[in-house]
Amino acid sequence: MNEELFTRSCAALDKEYDRLGQTERFRFLTCSKQAFRADIPALILDKYPSSNETGEADPVYFCEKGNAYLVERWFPDVSTGQAKIQRRMKSFFQDLKRVLSSPLSVSEFADHGILSAYHDPFRGGTGKRSFLNTFWREILQEIQPPLIFSFGKPGYDMLENHATRFCSGSFLQVAPEIPAQGTYYITCAVMECHGRKSLVTCIPSLARYAYDKVGSTQEAANAQMWNIVRQFLSSKS
């Protein structure tokens, strides 16, 4: 892992947390910090952590007991890993693991086979855009995996800003938007920075998007998305 970059990133979050005067601690990685490395195949950016409703101490910087979507209890009346977003993300992990042909179990894959984090680590999405752009810019200079998934538009917009304004690179949509659910769409673009290419996929927030719904518009949309991912990976091999 990139220990120095990870330490700098955590220090930056601590400093911004103090500046914002927040009272409930932020959350950064939702997986093991061992996944914070340049050769990771995929990065998942969720929108932001919600308020802690259980009173249990959440890991702040990383999760060494397993991926937060699989091993944590997020609501007092819901079993471990069974919150709606957790179930949907587990289904997403399974599909991503299949596309990457990973030999790891789903729990191992989610824990250290891919990198998962919050685009805005501050509770309720209270981080400032200028800070988040700078924060992720430093990380992306060293960790830019072939596949990047943003659950929600803010992370996608941040990546476009990074490519076109900071890197003098490019950010080009590679297919028509995929109708996913109601007014929600899935969007895929190729980001190129300093000679490195990544497929960036914007997916509706799993708080609203029923990713795991079978026999539906969602299932067809997911299939189209994964076909684009496979085509991109094939073009790089």
Image: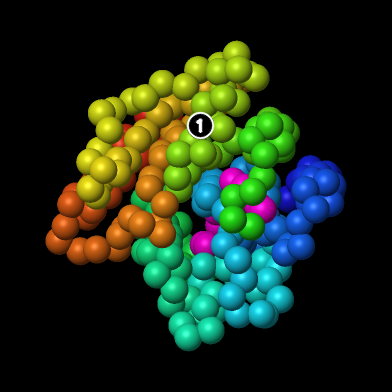
Residue at x 50% of width, y 17% of height: 170
Secondary structure under badge 1? helix
- Residue 26 pos. (x, y %): 70, 58
Q: Dot 1, crowdedness within 10 Å: few (<14), some or many (≥20)?
A: some
Residue at x 53% of width, y 84% of height: 76
| Amino acid at the residue labelled 1 | Asp
Q: How is the image coloured?
A: rainbow
- Residue 221 pos. (x, y %): 23, 47
Q: Is residue 113 magenta?
A: yes
Residue at x 59% of width, y 75% of height: 53
Left or right relative to 142: residue 20: right
Against 25, is 100 above or below? above
Q: Quadrant of the C terminus?
A: top left
Residue at the far top in the pictured view: 168
Front-lying residue, 191 or 61: 61
Residue at x 52% of width, y 78% of height: 75
Q: Is residue 68 magenta?
A: no
Against 65, is 176 above or below? above
What span is in magenta?
109-122
Against 207, is 161 above or below? above
Could one spot residue 140 in this view of the protein?
no
Against 129, is 18 above or below? below
Front-lying residue, 195 or 216: 216
Front-lying residue, 156 or 201: 156
How many numbered marks are there?
1
Could one spot residue 27 in this view of the protein?
yes
Front-lying residue, 53 or 42: 53
Residue named by callout 1:
157
Toward which corner of the image does residue 55 lie, by quadrant?
Answer: bottom right
- Residue 60 pos. (x, y %): 73, 63
- Residue 39 pos. (x, y %): 62, 43
